[in-house]
Image (tube, rainbow, N blue to C red):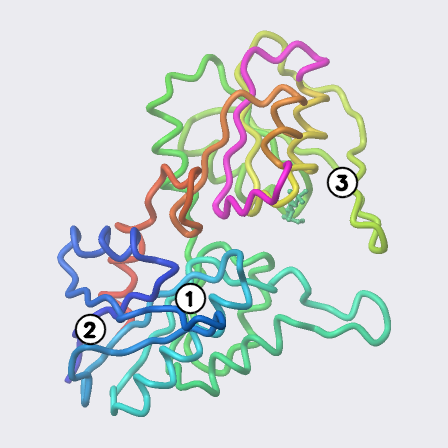
Amino acid sequence: MEGLDLVLVGPASRRLGRGLKAYGLEVVELEYRVFPDGESYLRVPVDVKGLNIAVLQSTYPPQDKHLIELFLALNVAKELGAEKIIAAVPYLAYARQDSMFKPGESVSLRTIIRLIEDCGASAFITFNIHKAERMEWFRIPSLNLSAVKAIADHLARLELIDPVILAPDKGAVYLAEEASSILKAEYSYLEKRRDRDTGSVETLYRELNVSGRDVVIIDDIISSGSTIANVAEIASKQGARRIFAACVHPLLAEGAMDRMRRAGVSKVLGTDCVEGAYDEVSVAPLLAEALRTMI
Ligand code: R5P
């Protein structure tokens, strides 16, 4: 039978799952609890035999736990006889380690992709994977959606004054370009170098036309907040009015908010690809549309 029958929602994407329901999809939450020793228990509470389904589970921190829950959910759905299974993983963990940067390193993205496929996914969908070209590693049909439209529509409601969109590195230029075309705003980018051993980031100083203007720094991920903080410091020194940080995946490791605030960031906003305190933009409409058309 053609068409998506239902979406099984894992514990990491409850809010987004409710969002999908509002867009008319049939949504069922997986039963979930944690054993006293920390292991996860999952149960599919409905009959999925012969159905086309999606398993919705993001893999933000704690990544390893959320990944195991994704694998368990995909595999039990397969064992129960689901016909097609879309793995809908709004944030795909381990995607940044996508090369052997130093000899002998594990290319963790490749391992994660193999596990998703081996657990029974027949298709895959995510948002703004760190490097779009890595989608080619999937042997199943796969889709890399962009959440930028949802973010830009949200920014448009903030009444920004003469905004400038900044990409903190070359990899984020496509995000700044897309946002600026929706917001009809100027964009620019900086250059960043990361030390592969310490993880520290250096941003090269350059003159930006930001004096007296609102600045939006946009990136795929905010983790330690260092990338954003470096750019905010430069923009702040050059007289930016207000500085916003926007991203698709607000991982926000410990200390990230303080680091960004100290650098002059007044507001951080992200999407519900990563559920938590900074998920004020919902990707539910984009995901609902994609899920409907993927099977
Ligand atoms: C890497 O290039 C990504 O696009 C982000 O810029 C990076 O993951 C952000 O990390 P952090 O917040 O730790 O600087």
Q: Magenta segment range?
A: 236-255
The answer as to whether callout 1 falls within 8 Å of ligand 1 is no
Quadrant including the C terminus? bottom left
- Residue located at (34% from left, 49% from top): 283
Q: Secondary structure at mark 2?
A: loop
Q: Is residue 229 left or right of residue 277?
A: right
Query: Which x, y percent locates residue 278?
Result: 44, 38
Q: Secondary structure at mark 3?
A: strand
The answer as to whether callout 2 falls within 8 Å of ligand 1 is no
Measure the C-alpha gap from mark 3 to mark 2.
Answer: 42 Å
Measure the C-alpha gap from mark 1 to mark 2.
Answer: 16 Å
Dot 2 amino acid type: Leu
Eyeballing the image, is 106 above or below 226? below
Q: Is residue 258 left or right of residue 157?
A: right
Tag 2 or tag 1, which sits nearer the N-term? Answer: 2
Label pair 1/3, CB-CB below 8 angstroms? no
Measure the C-alpha gap from mark 1 to mark 3.
Answer: 28 Å
Compare residues 274 and 109 and report the one nearer the observer. Answer: 274
- In the picture of the structure, the residue carrying the numbered disc 1 is 143
- Residue located at (25% from left, 76% from top): 53
Dot 1 amino acid type: Leu
Q: Is residue 22 left or right of residue 60?
A: left
**Residue 250 lies within the magenta run:** yes
- Residue located at (54% from left, 31% from top): 245
The answer as to whether callout 3 falls within 8 Å of ligand 1 is yes
- Residue located at (56% from left, 42% from top): 252
Q: Which mark is residue 4?
A: 2
Q: Nearer the viewer, mark 1 or mark 2?
A: 2
- In the picture of the structure, the residue carrying the numbered disc 3 is 192
Query: Which x, y percent locates residue 18?
Result: 22, 53
Compare residues 52 and 165 and report the one nearer the observer. Answer: 52
